[in-house]
Image (spheres, rainbow, N blue to C red):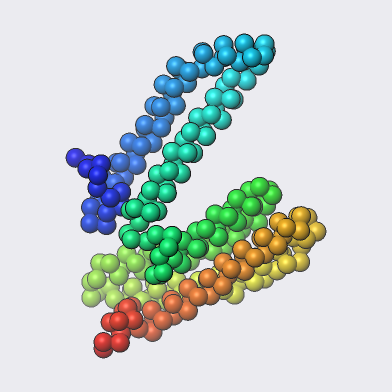
Amino acid sequence: MWDASAPILDPDAMAASDFLHAIWIAIAFVAARLVSEYLLSPPLTKFLRWIKPGSERHAGKIYDEFFMALAGIYTEALAIHVLIEANYGCRPWSTDPCLEMMVHHALTLTLICLGYGTNLLRYGTMWMALFDSSNPFLHGAKILNTIKADSLKTATWVVYLIFTLVFLVARILASPYSILRPAFTQSFDILPLWVSLAFITLMVLLYILQCFWFYKIVLIGIRGGKSKKEANEE
């Protein structure tokens, strides 16, 4: 049985049960929506009719927004809890490598929000598709490396090499032309100045982070997959 006091992301306890926990949370959300709508919609309709006759026809939409606001507060609180208390020791004030991922996600989420708010959906989708093209090879290499079978060593490094090449082409070489160039040359014509400057600043920072990651990817390959400490000991 799940211990509610246990860390949400305990690396020693992660198993198929973690997926079941997520399923139960999703079912709870659906159940809460159906039950609360059944109980609260009638009084909400009466209240709106009392406030302004005829406004009760908007009761469904108002309740939708109300429920989404509460659900958003809950999920945000849960995310903050995981970030601070159950994130493998990675916290906002950390100085170890996990800080890179936190910066990466902060930049990415801000860009996604800006892109959604300015209706640059195709631009953002193209960018994510370009960047994510290397991810399958990264996770494939991780899977093979985790198995640690001697017969899979060659396959592991082949997949890792493919990942490195795709990362280089998609994130390092293609990004300046396909992503940064349009922002520098066209954004000022279609967006307010402050939005354009915000986009460009965030994208340049994210590109710098990609270059830093590529440097680390190459170092991992040179060290044969060993950490810096392990490589120095040898």
172 is higher (above) or lower (below) than 83: below
Q: Is 96 placed left or right of 40 in the picture?
A: left
* Image position, residue 106 (x, y; %): 52, 58
Question: Which of the two residues, 119 or 42, is positioned nearer the viewer here?
Answer: 42
Residue positioned 47% across, 21% down in the render: 37
Could you say which quadrant of the image residue 128 lies in? bottom right
Any part of residue 138 in sight: no
In the displayed structure, 62 sits above or below 122; it is: above
Q: Which of the 4 image quarters holds residue 58?
A: top right
Q: Front-most of 223 and 1?
A: 1
Location of residue 207 in the rendering, given as x and y in whole percent from the top left corner: 58, 70
Residue at position x 38%, y 54% from top? 84
Q: Residue furthest front?
A: 93
Q: Residue at x 44, y 26 (%)?
A: 33
* Image-based side of 87 in relation to 169, left or right: left
Residue 96 can be seen, yes or no: yes
Q: Would you say 75 lies left or right of 211 here? A: left
Q: Nearer the viewer, residue 110 or 146?
A: 110
